Image (cartoon, rainbow, N blue to C red):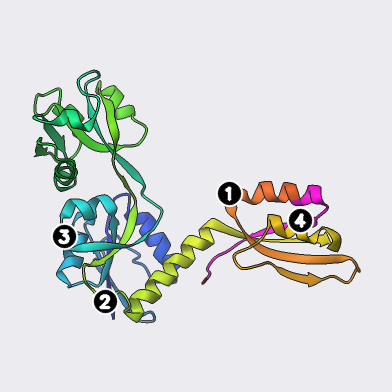
Amino acid sequence: MLRIAVPNKGSLSGPAGEMLHEAGYQQRKASKELVLVDPDNEVEFFYLRPRDIAIYVSSGRLDIGITGRDLLLDSGARAEELLPLGFARSTFHYAAKPGTISSAEDLSGLTVATSYEGLVAKHLADKGIDASVVHLDGAVETAIELGVAQVIADVVETGTSLRNAGLEVVGEPILQSEAVVIRRTGADPDTPKVQQFLRRLQGVLVARSYVMMDYDIRAEHLEEAVALTPGLESPTISPLHDQGWVAVRSMVRTTEAQRIMDDLYELGARAILTTGIHACRL
């Protein structure tokens, strides 16, 4: 039975549960459930603190887990990323009082406050910057005002919290993070149940990114239409009862669907329909 760690709370928990449900796995009905056995899929889910998941997976007690890339790197655990999942995206930056520093290289000799001590210390070491790192739980924006540090390193979304604290972003991002599937470093990547799990999640990602488009087009315009809707391999084309017309079915990216429908209409296509994709295998 495949043993999988899932975030039990926070910004990772809800989207992870939704994705697993879309992939056909049972999910817990109450937040107090810590373990859920899904016998039909031969999977056992363990609901853990997101910060602890990389540690559990690296120990070998659990086969794989879902956590944030930031939490994986911050943990220092012997675990590695298998698949990015596209939700819980965040960007890490250094921030300081305006005019005090202009780049990461200016951090030498300073103290950086952060909730991600391991991640920041590694980033500084990789750049050869000799700076001190102090760990703080929760919001770190007040660390500079209270004299604990001259710089902070934290998640930056809109930048509103930083501006309210009289701070500005400094230099390039430390990290672009998102939810990821992880495994223990050195574990067999070809385990059948792990590969099946990854295929299911990849199917969800594709289903969320594409729609199925159907339309009718005159045969003389078919090549131009196919150029607009090439599909993943090639579109399905079927003759219609009315001679000179064909029906076309193809997968197109959701973000491009409306533009493609406009272009097809101008080309003479009619009965243009899009339908959602609930699951797929490529």
In the rendered view, tell whether residue 264 sits above or below residue 192: above
Q: Are marks 3 and 2 in contact (CB under 8 Å)?
A: no
Q: Secondary structure at mark 3?
A: loop
Magenta-drawn stretch contains 192: no
Whether residue 227 is visible here, answered yes or no, is yes
Which quadrant holds residue 140? top left
Question: Disc 3 designates what residue?
Answer: 77
Residue 123 lies in what quarter of the image? Answer: top left
**Disc 1 on helix, strand or loop?**
helix
**Where does the image place residue 63, in percent across and percent down from the top left?**
25, 72
Q: Nearer the viewer, residue 221 or 10?
A: 221
Image coordinates for residue 160, horizontal then vertical, percent? 34, 28
C-alpha gap between disc 3 and disc 1: 37 Å
User: Which amino acid does the dot numbered 1 rest on?
Assistant: Thr
Image-based side of 218 in relation to 2, left or right: right
Residue at the front extreme? 128
The residue tagged 2 is 188
Amino acid on which disc 4 is placed: Glu
Labelled pair 4, 3 in contact (Cβ < 8 Å)? no
Disc 1 target residue? 255
Of labels 2 and 4, the one closer to you = 4
How many residues crowd around disc 2 within 10 Å: few (fewer than 14), some, or many (20 or more)? few
Is tag 3's residue or tag 2's residue first in the polypeptide sequence? 3
The x, y position of residue 15, in whole percent, is 39, 55
Whichever of callouts 4 and 3 sits on the residue coming sooner in the sequence is 3
**Mark 4 falls on what kind of element?**
helix
For label 4, the residue is 224
Secondary structure of the residue carrying numbered label 2: loop
Residue located 14% across and 35% down the image: 113
Highlighted magenta segment, given as a residue range: 264-280
* First of labels 2, 1 by sequence position: 2
